[in-house]
Image: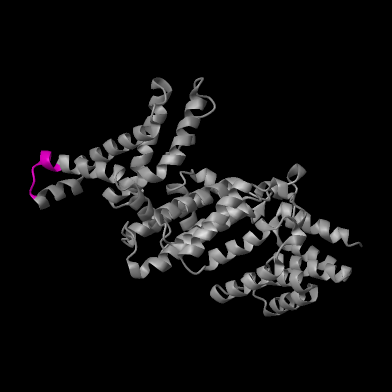
């Protein structure tokens, strides 16, 4: 049961303010509470159910008694009591009693102490366990994203559905199937062993960056960006960096998201119209986020060799450090893309390298790379490919060809704002 299921616009006066307070506390505390409960129950679905029981009790009691002075502690304590009640009643609890040969009272005290320990003393470890479990490779990518936002972001199914422009039942099914898969595959809620850490961490970082990317450049719909998703992904990245301070790629991802997020406000013009990088007012860039991003990048470099996210952060830093678009160090950026293509080869990386090469060494050189990608066909149906080609052709004075490329890009994209940008570029090149 969710906040929206319990309270609505027809509730008593003041109920809306209480609901907003509950929602805010839930968003902050949900991951910690569920993580602690999951360590005891061994099941994510049960842990979330217990945590949401506490949420429902808050929605019932707070409008009458008022919001407590420490609402997070109130939710935690209530969830703990629900878990203890469940353990008292469950057959599994009775079986454990028989196994250890203890009397009910002694075992009850032990269970309560263990639960206190889980909820209070191992927050960092529990959050890590929950994050690694929600992003487990046995789950498909879309399910990992939805489950992570639900468990650690405290988002409702409806909020996730609206963020990714999919029907709410679809998201609900993804989350339910993910929980069922984890239970059926008996995936333990634990940290990966050292030999598996690198691969499992890559899955976690991928999920966080997928969430951020969808917020930064929405793949579909009427909005160019969805800042809430950017903020949630960046928050998860910061939490992960605090829990794994010696992992260079974690800091690299945080640096990348901080620097990119610094430009979000400048990417939107009047009426929600997209503003491309070359045309952005850099005075609107968030200098605090840039400083934090550059500091995270420096931390990643201190720890070790930059990986894919760290290299992308270094590329983003080239923009962040340039006072104007024309002052960007395009040669350094092109060189960084060569390194990125070596450690994480992909057609998208090559397309981005073509942009940097085209700026550093002329549009002809960039067009050679793009034409090679077009012949390979790996990016067929990818709107940025014809858009980049159109830009390079326009700079070469080949207006008719450029116009066709922008029109092709407009036909391919599912984002309405992006389509408008491509059509404007095409119209600017004449009939």
Query: In the displayed structure, would residue 335 be above or below residue 140?
Result: below
Horizontally, residue 344 falls left or right of residue 176, namely right
Q: Nearer the viewer, residue 145 or 259?
A: 259
Horizontally, residue 389 falls left or right of residue 228, namely right
- Residue 375 in percent (x, y) is at 71, 79
Horizontally, residue 126 falls left or right of residue 90, namely right
The answer to whether residue 321 is magenta is no
Q: Quadrant of residue 50?
A: top left
The N terminus - image quarter: top left
Q: Which residues are magenta?
A: 101-107
User: What is the number of callouts on the image?
Assistant: 0
Q: Residue at x 73, y 56 (%)?
A: 277
Horizontally, residue 406 falls left or right of residue 33, namely right
Q: Quadrant of residue 113?
A: top left
- Residue 107 in percent (x, y) is at 14, 43
Query: In the displayed structure, would residue 221 be above or below residue 109?
Result: below
Q: Quadrant of residue 105?
A: top left
Q: Is residue 320 visible?
A: yes
Query: In the displayed structure, would residue 285 be above or below residue 23?
Result: below
The C terminus - image quarter: bottom right
The answer to whether residue 105 is magenta is yes
Q: Residue at x 51, y 68 (%)?
A: 307
Q: Nearer the viewer, residue 152 or 142?
A: 152
Q: Is residue 165 visible?
A: no
- Residue 331 in percent (x, y) is at 70, 70
Q: Residue at x 37, y 50 (%)?
A: 127
């Amino acid at each position: 049961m969710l906040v929206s299921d319990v309270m609505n616009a027809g509730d008593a006066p003041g109920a809306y303010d209480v609901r907003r307070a509950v929602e805010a506390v839930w968003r902050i505390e949900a991951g910690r509470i569920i993580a602690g409960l999951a360590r005891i129950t061994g099941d994510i679905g049960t842990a979330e159910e217990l945590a949401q029981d506490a949420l429902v009790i808050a929605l019932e009691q707070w409008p009458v008694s008022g919001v407590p002075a420490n609402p997070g502690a109130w939710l935690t304590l209530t969830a703990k009591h629900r878990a203890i009640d469940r353990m008292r009643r469950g057959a599994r609890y009775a079986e454990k009693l028989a196994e250890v040969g203890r009397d009910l009272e002694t075992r009850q005290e032990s269970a309560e102490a263990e639960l206190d320990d889980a909820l209070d003393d191992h927050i960092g470890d529990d959050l890590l366990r929950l994050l690694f479990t929600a992003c487990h490779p046995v789950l498909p990518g879309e399910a990992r994203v939805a489950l992570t936002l639900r468990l650690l972001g405290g988002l409702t199914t409806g909020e996730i559905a609206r963020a990714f422009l999919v029907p709410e039942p679809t998201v609900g099914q993804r989350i339910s199937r993910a929980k069922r898969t984890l239970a059926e595959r008996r995936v333990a809620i634990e940290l990966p062993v050292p030999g598996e850490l690198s691969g499992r961490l890559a899955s976690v970082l991928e999920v966080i960056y997928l969430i951020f990317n969808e917020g930064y450049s929405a793949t579909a719909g009427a909005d160019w960006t969805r800042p809430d998703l950017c903020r949630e992904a960046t928050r998860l990245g910061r939490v992960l960096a605090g829990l794994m301070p010696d992992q260079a790629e974690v800091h690299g991802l945080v640096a990348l998201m901080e620097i990119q997020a610094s430009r979000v406000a400048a990417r939107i013009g009047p009426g929600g119209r997209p503003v491309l990088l070359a045309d952005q007012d850099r005075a609107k860039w968030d200098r605090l986020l840039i400083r934090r991003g550059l500091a995270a990048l420096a931390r990643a470099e201190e720890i070790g060799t930059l990986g894919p996210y760290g290299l992308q952060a270094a590329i983003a830093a080239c923009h962040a450090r340039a006072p104007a678009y024309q002052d960007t160090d395009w040669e350094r950026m092109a060189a960084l893309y060569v390194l990125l293509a070596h450690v994480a080869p992909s057609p998208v990386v090559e397309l981005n390298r073509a942009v940097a090469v085209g700026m550093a060494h002329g549009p002809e050189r960039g067009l050679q790379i793009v034409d090679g990608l077009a012949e390979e066909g790996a990016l067929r149906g990818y709107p940025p490919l014809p858009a980049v080609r159109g830009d390079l052709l326009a700079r070469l004075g080949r207006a008719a060809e450029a116009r066709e490329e922008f029109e092709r890009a407009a036909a391919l994209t599912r984002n309405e704002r992006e389509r408008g940008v491509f059509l404007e570029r095409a119209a600017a090149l004449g009939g």
